[in-house]
Image (cartoon, rainbow, N blue to C red):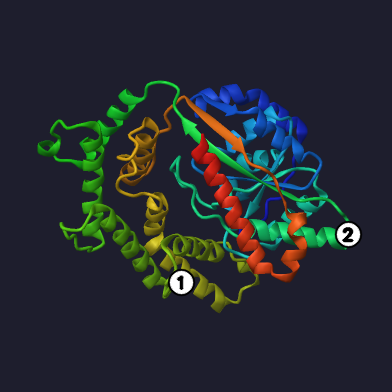
Amino acid sequence: MLDFKPPKPNTAAIQILQAFMPLINRLWLKGLTLDVDAESIARLKMTDGYPTVLAPNHAARSDPAVIFHLSKQVSQQYCYMTARETFDKGKFGLCSFLLQRFGAYSIVRGTADRNAFRTTRKLLSEGEWPLVIFAEGEISRQNDTVMRFERGIVQLCFWALDDMAKAEIDKPLYVVPIGIKYHYPQDMWDDIDAALTELEDHILPPADRTPVERYERLRRIGVAIFKTLATEYQYKVDETVPLDMHIQKLKEQILSHAEKIMGIDSEADVLTRVRGLKNLVDAEVYRDIEQMTEYERKIHEELLQKFQQFYPDLERLINFIAISDGYVAEEQSPERFLEVIIRLEREVFGTSKMRGPRVASVRVGEPVNLREHYDTYKAQKRETVEQITQGLETDVRALVAGV
């Protein structure tokens, strides 16, 4: 069981990090800069002093750094709900120590993480620090794609309103939709060509590396990877069926393979099922074994061994969950080329390269005051949570599309 990591925000530590951001940018973020308009800043300022959740999309691993940049620009300090495994990166516990001082706290996804829920409700009830929660739960790795939002964010907000009502605190509680979108301010085509060459050297036999247009090179690499995976998962390829249909069917077959190992039968969509499997893994990995009997520990260990059989499948699904044939074809921009290249690099090499510099455009939508929906929520809880979540998702999608 991984212990809960509470937020321990320290203003001095945050200011030191802000001072070092230019160096961090050069060394690790390849020169990331922020583009935020005056209207977005004004909308963030509207919620000053009130309980607030910031709900950005999650297109890239750099998103937390972008939001940290944003906090500096608007002179606000945030807390961050963060996946528990993030705190174990690095050595000697330094990452965990720093993250907590920067305002991050842990959550074990897919579990009734009472410590995380209690902390979230407390932070919102007190309203001192705006809280950042990436509503998609996973990284889409696609600039123009916003995946379906998790419902838990809005539910936690209404629970916080319950707490505020008991404490006779009559304040608004805001959820603020935020869209993040990246672009490269300089010519990236040489970097793209070099990345394609490296992938071709590892994927294609020399006879197949004939000169073709850039998009055809990318697609040729993708098809070669698809055929390799199809063989591995014993998926039969029908040449008369469009590639995109094959991609979706292969995702389904990989997912079904993992579910079969776990004895799960679901008719939900692929994204819901992938989230469910990820949550199932997290829930078991982070169970408290201290209170288990010897027999319960034995069953727990057997389950962990099962997970080892399909965890690579799960990571592969998360990497490719939003991918489709034609994504680059409909807009052959450097951003879309590199988004797909990063996925392919993660599949082939196990890691990917960050290229830059990049500009992160941030647009903030109208804050939603959940206090105005509280009476409706008390009468129709599930329906109200669903409706507001869908509205936030729609708002974020519009913000991303509008950049």
* Residue 108 locus on image (x, y percent): 60, 58
**In the image, residue 19 above or below residue 175:** above
Q: CA distance from mark 2 to mark 1?
A: 46 Å
**Looking at the rendered structure, which numbered label has been put on residue 302?**
1
Q: Element under label 1?
A: helix
Amino acid at dot 1: Glu
* Residue located 74% across and 35% down the image: 45
Rendering coords of residue 375 (x, y %) = 77, 64
Q: Which residue is mark 2?
A: 167
Q: What x and y, as percent, mark residue 314?
A: 41, 58
- Residue drawn at x 30%, y 32% is 195
- For label 1, the crowd category at 10 Å Cα-Cα, with few meaning under 14, some 14 to 19 and many 20 or more, is few
Q: In the image, residue 182 lies at what x, y percent? A: 48, 33
Q: Residues within 10 Å of mark 2 (few under 14, many from 20)?
A: few
Of labels 2 and 1, the one closer to you: 2
Image quadrant holding the N terminus, namely: bottom right
Say above or below: 113 vs 333: below
Q: Is residue 246 left or right of residue 121?
A: left
- Where is residue 263, by image quadrant? bottom left
In the image: residue 167, left or right of residue 349: right
Q: Which residue type carries mark 2?
A: Ala
